Amino acid sequence: MRGGAWLDKKEPDKAISDFDACIRLNPNDSTSFNNRGVAWRDKKDYVQGDCPTTARLIRIFPKNVVAHVNRGVAWRLKNEYDKAILDYD
């Protein structure tokens, strides 16, 4: 919950730290992975935002719609529209 509050306060570095701690405690927590990806995206670090975080989330939970949408947004922001469309589909 605190990581989400940091996101709301526009403090992505603090949010990432909290989400990292959550993931260490529960490596299968899809929400923490997803929210960490959102924090990286908020920092405009699209490589971190879509690759190590959301890609791993998609490998763990391949039917997680939110993860695909968020990775699609990261691809769109990188002007990689074909990859974005694949995730949106």
Image (cartoon, rainbow, N blue to C red):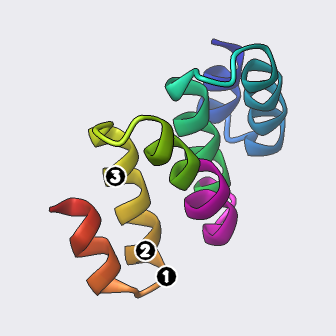
Indicate which label's residue lies in the foreground, 2 or 3. 3
Marks 1 and 3 in Cβ contact (< 8 Å): no
Quarter assignment of residue 13: top right
Q: Main secondary structure of the magenta part?
A: helix
Tag shown at residue 68: 3
Marks 2 and 3 in Cβ contact (< 8 Å): no
Three-letter residue code for mark 2 = Trp
Q: Is residue 46 magenta?
A: yes
Q: Nearer the viewer, residue 48 or 24?
A: 24
All told, the count of numbered labels is 3
Tag shown at residue 21: none
**The N terminus - image quarter:** top right
**Residue farthest to the left, as pictured:** 89
Marks 2/3: CA distance?
10 Å
**20 with respect to 58 (left or right):** right
Percent position of residue 86, x then y: 24, 71
Quarter assignment of residue 12: top right
Which of the marked residues, 2 or 3, is nearer the chain's N terminus? Answer: 3
**Which range of residues does the magenta coloring cover?**
42-53
Q: Residue at x 62, y 49 (%)?
A: 53
Marks 1 and 2 in Cβ contact (< 8 Å): yes
Q: Is residue 59 magenta?
A: no
Label 1 residue SS:
loop
Tag 1: Cα neighbours inside 10 Å, few (<14), some, or many (≥20)?
some
Indicate which label's residue lies in the foreground, 1 or 3. 3
**36 with respect to 61 (left or right):** right
Three-letter residue code for mark 1 = Lys
Q: Nearer the viewer, residue 8 or 51?
A: 51
Tag shown at residue 78: 1
Label 2: which residue? 75
Percent position of residue 82, x then y: 27, 85
